[in-house]
Amino acid sequence: MTDIEIAQQYNAEKIQIIGEKLGIEADLLHPFGKDKAKLPLTLIDEERLKKTKLVLVSAISPTPAGEGKTTTTIGLNEGLRKIGKNSIAVLREPSLGPVFGMKGGATGGGYAQVIPMEDINLNFTGDFGLIEKANNLLSAMIDNCIQSKSPLVHIDPRTVKWKRVIDMNDRALRNIVVALGGKQNGFPREDGFNITAASEIMAILCMAKDFADLKNRLGNIYIGNDFENKPVYAKDIKAHGAMAALLKDTIMPNLVQSLEGNPVIIHGGPFANIAQGTNTIIATKMGMSLSDITVTEAGFAFDLGGEKFLDIKCREAGLKPDAVVLVATVRALKYHGGIAKEELSNENLEALERGAANLKRHIENVQKFGITPLVAINNFPADTQAEINLLKSICSDIGVKAELSEVWAKGGEGAIDLANALVAALEEGKADFKPIYELNATPEEKIEKVAKEIYRADQVIFTKKAKRDLALIKKLGLESLPVCIAKTQYSFSEDPKALGAPLGFDITIRTIEIAAGAGFIVPIVGDMMRMPGLPGRPAAENIDIDDQGNISGLF
């Protein structure tokens, strides 16, 4: 059966029952229908979360063969609860871009899913829509300020950095001109759209500690300059109050459930290749306030989501992860070893050994943060025992434990060994987390540290545009911010076709965007764009709904 057919077989428990499993009284929930609810921020217990173990699930570099990071996160949590642990999974919300594009949904797969699968993948509780509206409200107020010659500030339209957003892969909107049709429509200027997951509003939501912090960060959004070349922020045009009002419910994390009836928190949805790729600090802290073990994930591979989770999110939130689980598949590693997608079902030990270089590099990168990872081998039906044994042996030879994960086919039962191995690692308590760079380093030094230490680049090249951006960052006094590098997810290099563990390459920083509200800067590598396009045959072509309202084609 397809993922959606499996999910539709299950009758979800009422959300009040799921809340009871976490000790949450029904009156504290803000229900969205029968099977979804918002959680109030009052449930965060700063003292309790200090005693909770935090586990990050990351992965090898993604391939068309699939890795199953979210599926593993959900299944691992099911396994932990099966062995009697008070655990919870904390995930990101799906974007419609991948859902209708190429990647599909983000609610897990097989028998390791969260439900209601259709709602979560499509509109959920409306968080993405309100983030989009808050972002575009600021755009409207910027253009209105320019048109009306606001007494608050005289924005120079040539300097405006802020873009509109839409939660869709729409390449036609990357570069546009607004306010055409006469002076009654405004002052014509160049503009563009990012996808909502790349909006600074999304990043701010994920970095905010509470509502006051959210509002303050919204006010610190850098818009551009006035005609005297002085910086202009969202608070200068008094936009942040209305933006915060739109997000009054969005800031609350969402409670749903797994197929096995276990609580799952889902909140925030930035991509890891163009943003920080982790769920909200608020959601992670809430999960830690309600459990003894919190299992969370970060987007794409460890060089992107994992690095940003540790260097940006954990540092800002004051969190210290206790373990990292690295997801790998035999299929994906054979792909990294040079085998075509059509041949991945055939046993090939030589290709697997070649492709394991990608896994080894990610393991080395995790260890640079003071943590030895546990490898989860996400099982596919075509995997042979010889291939599984070889992969375990490769990990064992470098001092890393690997366990088979069969959660797609078996749910929590397929994660018992993985869960026990994780608990053993947590009880050993050997993790000694430390960031890869210091905040007092210059932006160039921080970028080079990540590029050389994590990607293994020979050198970092800054274009003339990037150098001008660095000068602006210095002028604005933002040099101490962490770096959130936007780079292709498919390779350690900037070339998506350079698979495995490439060496002998440079990293080119084309431009550097400022996310002063979120609290980081965004160096953009090579041709990376913050508005994806649809593939030639988008997933949307297969999605349908029948006369009874049953949705099909989601995966």
Image (cartoon, helix red, strand yellow):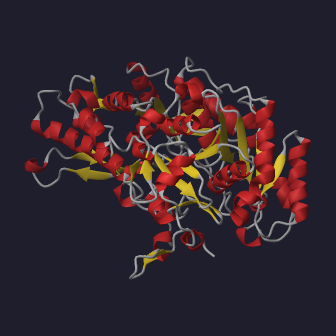
**116 in relation to 128, above or below:** below
Q: Nearer the viewer, residue 436 or 525?
A: 436
Judge left or right: residue 220 versus residue 104.
Answer: left
Residue at the image point whose x is 61% and y is 26% from the top:
50
Residue at the image point whose x is 26% and y is 24% from the top:
229
Q: Within the image, what quadrant is residue 10 found in?
A: bottom right
Q: Does residue 217 show up? A: yes
**339 in relation to 146, above or below:** below
Which quarter of the rendering shows the N terminus? bottom right
Residue 377 locus on image (x, y percent)? 78, 54
Query: In the displayed image of the protein, which residue is found farthest to the left?
Result: 184
Residue at the image point whose x is 31% and y is 44% from the top:
135
Q: Does residue 527 show up? A: no
**128 in relation to 386, above or below:** above
How many numbered discs, if any? 0
Judge left or right: residue 518 versus residue 508.
Answer: left
Residue 263 locus on image (x, y percent)? 56, 50
Q: Nearer the viewer, residue 225 or 94?
A: 94
Residue 483 locus on image (x, y percent)? 53, 31
Judge left or right: residue 303 versus residue 43.
Answer: right
Residue at the image point whose x is 45% and y is 29% from the top:
519
